[in-house]
Amino acid sequence: MADESWLDIPGGSDFSLSNLPFGIISYEGATNPRPAVAIGDHALDLQVFAAGGGFASLPDILPHLSVFQEPTLNAFAELGRSLHQKTREHIRLLLLKDTSIPSVLRDNNLRHSSLIALSKIQTHLPMRIGDYTDFYVGKHHAYNVGVLFRGPANALQPNYTHLPVGYHGRASSIVVSGTPVRRPWGQILDENKAPIYHPSKRLDIELELGAFICKGNTMGSPVPVSRAEDYIFGYVLLNDWSARDIQAWEYVPLGPFNSKNFASTISAWVVLADALEPFRAEGIANESELQPYLKTETTKAMFDINLEVSIPSTSSEASVITRSNARYLLWSFPQMVAHHTVGGCPLNSGDLLGSGTISGPDAGTQGSLLELTEGGSKSIEIPGGSRKFLQDGDEVVIRGWCVNEKGERVGFGEAKGQILEPWANGLAPE
């Protein structure tokens, strides 16, 4: 049976007492962005909560209350996993129906000043993102795409099962859920295989999970895989929008560039690493002999997170185009951290690591339109029409959630974005 709260938490809410994700909000009367925790249909304004004595009975956080006055979660993240866990548990205990300290929030005017309806808030990027690295560890996706371009015999490159393949993305174009995305211009090939300057005709999604880093390592000092978990603050949904036709022409020999750097959308609420611990699961088995720095002791390094992508319609019909799961990864995030730093690369608080597209093994579980349409050779049906790739006006919504033994959801909310038409002649109006 789910724990009861004195606060009304709708059944099926992503933001149950077992979750309590952190984000950055503003609202009328509080226009400066500040940290918050999502609970059901409300957000707990941590700036107001801290100023009102909400943390008085948590002595470990008292020297650090200034972190709740910051416009990002970076300073809070840097406090470390132990304090993240204590802070989250403190808030959970205060929200219980039979809380032992009702005077702090339940029976206090602080309840009315610090709890804000989600319908009245504006969310912002939760972290100040200094660097973004996108990996490619969804093996089913890598295989499917490899088959399209190289055939089954050469679908996976020889290095794929020996190291987590990745590349450095563009942090400046990461946006929070709800931000529109403009269709990009770039060089594509025409019907005669000649390059032309044109808006992308093959705009796509990539269903991913992102991990935020909470502390840095010294330059020249790799992070051992056995300690890599301590560097992970929490997780978000990630849509790494991709212009496939721009990518096809530009990616040789150095990989994606303009086809990826125009936008990446993340969900607004960071689900803390501790909240996902009950949902650990085995990933895709790797039969290759790993180098020592990538070997882990646990076999359950992934998470059983249900993933879903929809293109909403004005009709009442279902608009889900694919369903997958975060366990369909070959490499774990701790392994990604270990590999990223093995040469001495310094990570910093707020860095974002993307998993790469997470596709399942079966039809209807692919994490991109490129796979779902077999390279654009067929259409998928959605209410009111069909798609090979995204059209202007399409809104893409990614959702992700776990369900515990109590029936409570630990969810991420949404990573949502709508495609805007390209600028005329490729230039924004002055």
Image (cartoon, grey):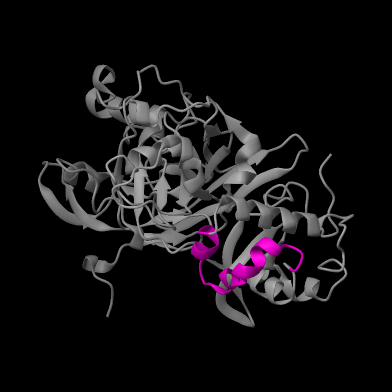
In the image, 387 versus 49, the foreground residue is: 49
Q: Quick check: is 295 in the magenta stretch?
A: no
Q: Quick check: is 58 in the magenta stretch?
A: yes
From the top left corner, tell me how far across and down residue 201 is, in percent. Answer: 28, 49
Depicted 72 relative to depicted 51: above or below: above
In the image, 223 versus 179, the foreground residue is: 223
From the top left corner, tell me how far across and down residue 326 is, in percent. Answer: 52, 35
Any part of residue 169 in sight: yes
In the rendered image, which quarter contains the N terminus? top right
So how many labels did they put on this image?
A: 0
Q: Residue at x 51, y 65 (%)?
A: 75
Depicted 374 relative to depicted 289: above or below: below
In the image, 364 versus 340, the foreground residue is: 340
Quarter-of-image position of residue 255: top left
Q: Which residue is drawn at 45% across and 52% down?
A: 213
Lateral position of residue 110 relative to residue 285, left or right? right
Quarter-of-image position of residue 393: bottom left
In the image, 186 versus 252, the foreground residue is: 252
Lateral position of residue 243 relative to residue 369, left or right? left
Depicted 126 relative to depicted 116: above or below: above
Lateral position of residue 141 relative to residue 176, left or right? left
Q: What stretch is highlighted in magenta?
A: 56-78
Any part of residue 40 in sight: no
From the top left corner, tell me how far across and down residue 77 is, in percent. Answer: 53, 58
